[in-house]
Image (spheres, grey):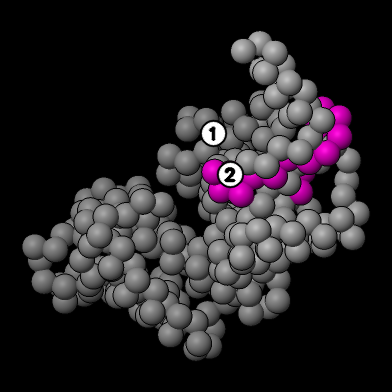
Amino acid sequence: MALHAASREALAAVELKLLDTLEGAATDDLGEQLFAVVGLLDSEIGLRRALADHSTEPASRERLVRDLLGGKIGAGALEVVAAAVTARWSSPRELVDGLESLGTTALLVRAERAGRLDSVEDELFRLGRIIADQNRLEQVLADRTADKAGKLELVRGLIQAKTDPTTVALVENLVGQPRGRGVVPGLEALAAEAAKRRERSVAHVISAAPLTAAQQEQLSVSLQRIYARPIALHLEIDPDLRGGIVIRVGDEVIDGSVAGRLDALRRRFAA
């Protein structure tokens, strides 16, 4: 999510309000409620323009949102939305982007406090890999003209019953309200956000065969030594590698696969 300077400042300020609100009671579904507000503003152009219009008094914008949403969402969610609309955003669209980011943060904090953030991160990544491997499914989920209920039903069929509720809420918001994002990049971004919340970078590791627990531990320690920070491993199997592994951390790729070495040899002889 790319925000202009004013919106970044607004988001940082409202995040403090969000975290204060999450300390209170009855905030378990705050993230889902913020996503519902995002859906409303996404479909109501005039409303989001009115709420982001910094030529009007902040108190007027707050009064509008309280009159509109009071009694329809929880008190905690209402306080966060009220704080958001009184801030100065660069555009109406970035106000909506900010509210969605706040909803995501609320859900990740919930998972973190429940000790489930690792599971949520892993589930998001694995679902992204499943969808990426099924081109037709990815196309259907990315189709803006496709029925929203139908797309949600499709993705629910991929989510196991034991999937964490936080993962389900994040995925359903992404699929139901894609807002110009692809499903696979969106899932990868959410997984990265979960990893970031744990102050870890993400290493996407592709291996020809499954890595043992000992190999994963050794790899994690090695990467931590290289990058001087904790590294979360996202594992994927690709038999076409023939052997070895490929590691991607951000824009850096470490290719230790047999296929990669063969490709390098071919390029050398072709030069």
Residue placed at 62% from the left, 32% from the top?
138
Q: Which residues are magenta?
A: 235-252
Q: Residue furthest bottom?
A: 24
The one nearer the camera, 160 or 208, is 208
Q: State whether residue 10 is above or below residue 123.
A: below
Residue 152: x and y, percent? 61, 44
In the picture, the disc for residue 36 is: none
Please indicate, yes or no, whether residue 68 appears anywhere in the rendered image: no
Of tags 1 and 2, the one toward the viewer is 2
- The residue pinned by badge 2 equals 252
Q: Amino acid at mark 1?
A: Ala
Q: Amino acid at mark 2?
A: Glu
Q: State whether residue 38 is above or below residue 177.
A: below
- The residue pinned by badge 1 equals 142
Q: Residue furthest top?
A: 270
The part of the image, by quadrant, that contains residue 162 is: bottom right
Residue 229: x and y, percent? 61, 66
